Image (cartoon, rainbow, N blue to C red):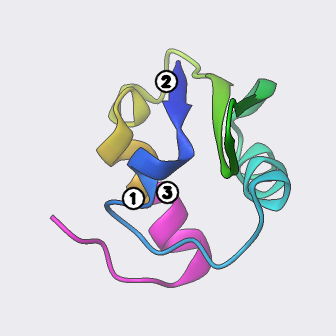
Amino acid sequence: MRILVSWLQEYVDVPVSIETLAKDLTMRGFEVASVDPVDGRADDAVIDFEITANRPDCLSVIGMAREAAVKYERPLRS
């Protein structure tokens, strides 16, 4: 599943760099297949996650935002 980091940040403030975000979510069980920068935007990228069958709750941007919110102890915006 490919997620634009700026979409994720609409739901939760991510206090780390894109590379650290990808690494931290990998440590939470989500394999990162790639991190592709967005042309013309140094502060944004597309992260391609491999979501396992036992985590259907994370098959959306809001699901991954929940994971990031828990990891960084930030409130989730709706």
Please tell me whether residue 62 is drawn above or below residue 47 in the rendered image.
Answer: below
The magenta segment: 67-78
- The residue drawn where x is 47% and y is 50% is 6
Q: How many marks?
A: 3
For discs 2 and 1, the disc positioned in front in the rendered view: 1
Q: Which mark is residue 66?
A: 1
The residue located at (30%, 72%) in the rendering is: 76
Q: Is 76 on the left or on the right of 42, as rendered?
A: left
Q: Is residue 71 magenta?
A: yes
Quadrant occupied by the C terminus = bottom left
Q: Position of residue 2 (x, y in %)?
A: 55, 21
Check disc 2 and report the residue beneath it. Answer: 54
Q: Are marks 3 and 2 in contact (CB under 8 Å)?
A: no
Q: Are marks 3 and 1 in contact (CB under 8 Å)?
A: yes
Q: Element under label 1?
A: helix
Amino acid beneath label 2: Asn
Q: Amino acid at mark 3?
A: Glu
Q: Which residue is mark 3?
A: 67
Secondary structure category for the residue under label 2:
loop
Q: Is residue 50 left or right of residue 26?
A: left
Nearest the viewer among 34 and 37 is 37
Check the image and report above or below for 78 versus 26.
below
* Residue at x 76%, y 27% (from the top left corner): 36
Residue at 42 percent of width and 35 percent of height = 58
